[in-house]
Amino acid sequence: MKKLILCLSVMTVAFSACNSNKSNAGQQGSHDMQNMSQTDSASKEISSMPDAKNSVSIKEIISSYQVLKNALTEDNSTAAAKAGGEVQSAFKNFNKTILTADQKKIFEEVEADASEHAEHIAENGGNIAHQREHFEILSKDINDLAKSFGEELK
């Protein structure tokens, strides 16, 4: 239990640190505008694809992960199972076509392992200890993803 609390604390601090670095916002303004125009053109191309309405962003993966973390913190294995399914679905519906080659490689390395752990969490609604075992490994995958896509999370 102490390990879980420590792990959750570390993850919370890590995510907070990723989100609190707003001091570069002025310097990145022109860079962000360029990224937005590239993203807009990519979005237009993607919107013509049938799966575009089902695609999710990295932020949505992180958000569903945080719901899972909160459910496990509250010892709610049923809510954790539901959230595990949402994490798995978020990975499945993520639109990889908008990623660079390097980002796609990193995402695919994380995706297979993270989806498997999310699936185990979703399928073990009555076994919170088993869910927490998989959550610990899932947390490492999500942390790797957050580090790799840090700019997209701001």
Image (tube, rainbow, N blue to C red):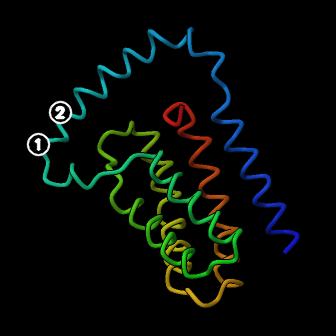
Looking at numbered disc 1 in the image, what kind of residue is underneath it?
Ser
Residue 45 horizontal side relative to residue 142, left or right? left
Query: Which residue was labeled with disc 1?
Result: 48
Residue 59: % across, % down: 47, 45
Looking at numbered disc 2 in the image, what kind of residue is underneath it?
Lys
Residue 44's disc number: 2
Residue located 56% across and 87% down the image = 124
Residue 72 horizontal side relative to residue 67, left or right? right
Image quadrant where one finds the C terminus: top right
Q: Is residue 137 above or below residue 129?
A: above
Residue 122: % across, % down: 50, 79
Which residue is at the front of the view, 78 or 130?
A: 78
Residue 104: % across, % down: 42, 46
Image quadrant where one finds the N terminus: bottom right
Q: Sort mark 1 into few (<14), some (14-19) or many (20+) by Cα contacts within 10 Å.
A: few
Marks 2 and 1 close (CB-CB < 8 Å): yes
Residue located 29% across and 19% down the image = 37
Residue 88, by quadrant, is bottom left
Q: Sort mark 2 into few (<14), some (14-19) or many (20+) by Cα contacts within 10 Å.
A: few
Q: Residue furthest bottom?
A: 126
Residue located 46% across and 41% down the image = 103
For marks 2 and 1, give the CA distance. 7 Å
